Image (cartoon, rainbow, N blue to C red):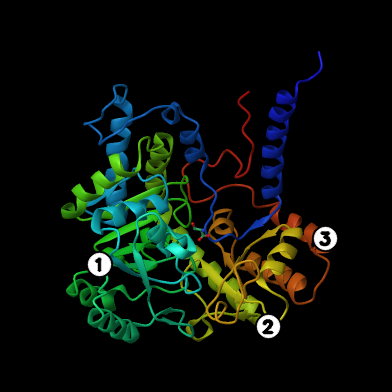
Amino acid sequence: MAETANKKSYKKIFSQLKDHNKWFENSIPLIASENVPSPAVREAIISDFGNRYAEGWPGERVYAGCIYIDEVEFECMKLAKKLFKAEFADVRAISGVVANLAIYSAFTNPGDVMLAPSIPAGGHISHGKKEHSGTAGLVHGLEIEFYPFDAEEMTIDVDKTIQKVEELKKLGRLPKMAMFGGSLFLFPHPVKELAEFLKGHGMHVNYDAAHVAGLIAGGEFQDPLREGADTMTMSTHKTLFGPQGGLVLGSEKHGDAIKKATFPGLTSSHHIHHMAAKAITFAEALEFGKDYAKDVIKNAKILAESLSGFGFKVLGESRGFTKSHQIAVNVLDYSDGGEVEANLEKANIIVNRQLIPGDIKAGRNYFHPGGIRLGVSEITRLGMKGSEMKEIASFIKQVVIDKKDPKKILPKVKSLRKDFQKVHYCFDKKLGAYEYVKLR
Ligand code: DSN
């Protein structure tokens, strides 16, 4: 009998899934918001937990069948609290965006003003205005005021923020929430310097640690909950090397509002297989996170210095380029971020184009911004160190500055990748980082 169109689609999907894994086995993945999970995390993700509902809080579910799920979720919360030294953890947000929405819902009302970083200054779409379809504006009806940003220092300007808040107060637009953190995140944000002032003006201070959660957990970035943030949100799959998901942390007094916002407010299923995988991640981060965070920051610095040495305009130069997993490069001397992203991809070097300070004023847009963003979380996890960072910088230089045919760089990329096929900083390393698992 001839193969049906349905069967053809079915087979094609599997062959594309396999091709994707093969491609990543032979690539240099530098997307700063991504990472590769451990084999243990992958095992939890395919468990039967993913087929169940467990609405509510562990021990108070609205479904039967949750005996083991409850035990894992209690353990997950315990590990999250230990990892981030937090009194309260809600591990149910299914993403960083949902974690932020939980905070907006718990501590603000539609129409309130929120202070947040703009996108070219590193803000995330979930902090954004309604007219940009940002979650805060579009979904929760918040009005957004941007922090003044110091493009030289690549961080929020403290003095100008204080002035801006005073001005907003006079205009009757005092924010109810201040959001720190974001997506382009090279240096710690001034939480210590501003939290007391902002809270003194009645603001709830949240820190979005999506990008830097693994560095905070490893004790190698800033420590927002000690520096004055009321709550901290994050996704669990960037520098924190877990499954895609979210996490909300705070103190006991914030617990009730966060719990209600998360369920029934924002989740029905909280993707319980991912919850179990988060628990595994927290245990691995407690065990290996310090070394990992140190190595990530070291690698980022070496990659940034090497790129700068080749003549690239790496942002944050006056402060040593980066204190996180990220590097931002202004590529306007060569073309634009969109073209650079596409050319590097042809050499299996995966980066993303990036709006950088000054882009919007200069009329550049997200498709053709002035920069690219690189992150070393994933290649560090694969065991790469300083000499590989230097080699990668040279590949990027050959494609972008020397304008060599990316196809000529491709074999060099593949050859570099040969020795880096396992996940490090985890308990069990048997399965290859991108090894395809067939269950059929
Ligand atoms: N859009 C992602 C980033 O790359 O920062 C985060 O959600």
Residue 396 occupies quadrant:
bottom right
Circle 3 residue: 407
Say which mark, if any, is on residue 311.
2
Q: Examine the rendering and report whether any part of residue 213 can be seen.
A: no
In the structure shown, which secondary structural element does the residue marked by tag 2 occupy? loop
Three-letter amino acid code at the position of disc 2: Gly
Q: The residue tagged with tag 3: helix, strand or loop?
A: helix
Side of 53 relative to 384 (left or right): left
| Label 2 or label 1, whichever comes before in sequence order | 1
In-front residue for pair 250/261: 261
Outermost residue toward the top in this view: 1
Q: Which disc number belongs to residue 176?
A: 1
Residue positioned 21% across, 75% down in the render: 196
Q: Residues within 10 Å of mark 3 (few under 14, many from 20)?
A: some
Residue 384 visible (yes or no):
yes
Q: Is mark 3 within 8 Å of ligand 1?
A: no
Rendered residue at 46%/43% (across/down): 427
Q: Label 1 amino acid?
A: Lys
Q: Amino acid at mark 3?
A: Lys
N-terminal of the pair, mark 3 or mark 1, is 1
Disc 1 is placed on an element classified as loop
Q: Label 1: how many residues lie within 10 Å, few (<14), some (14-19) or many (20+)? A: many
Percent x, y of residue 173: 27, 74
Q: Tags 3 and 1 in contact by the CB under 8 Å rule? A: no
Q: With respect to residue 216, does 102 lie above or below?
A: above
Query: What is the distance, in whole Å, between disc 3 and disc 2 at their CAs?
Result: 23 Å
- Asked if the residues shown at circle 2 and circle 1 are in contact, with their CB atoms under 8 angstroms apart, the answer is no
Mark 3 or 1, closer to the camera: 1
C-alpha separation, residue under disc 2 versus residue under disc 1: 44 Å
Describe residue 32's horizontal placement relative to residue 106 as left or right: right
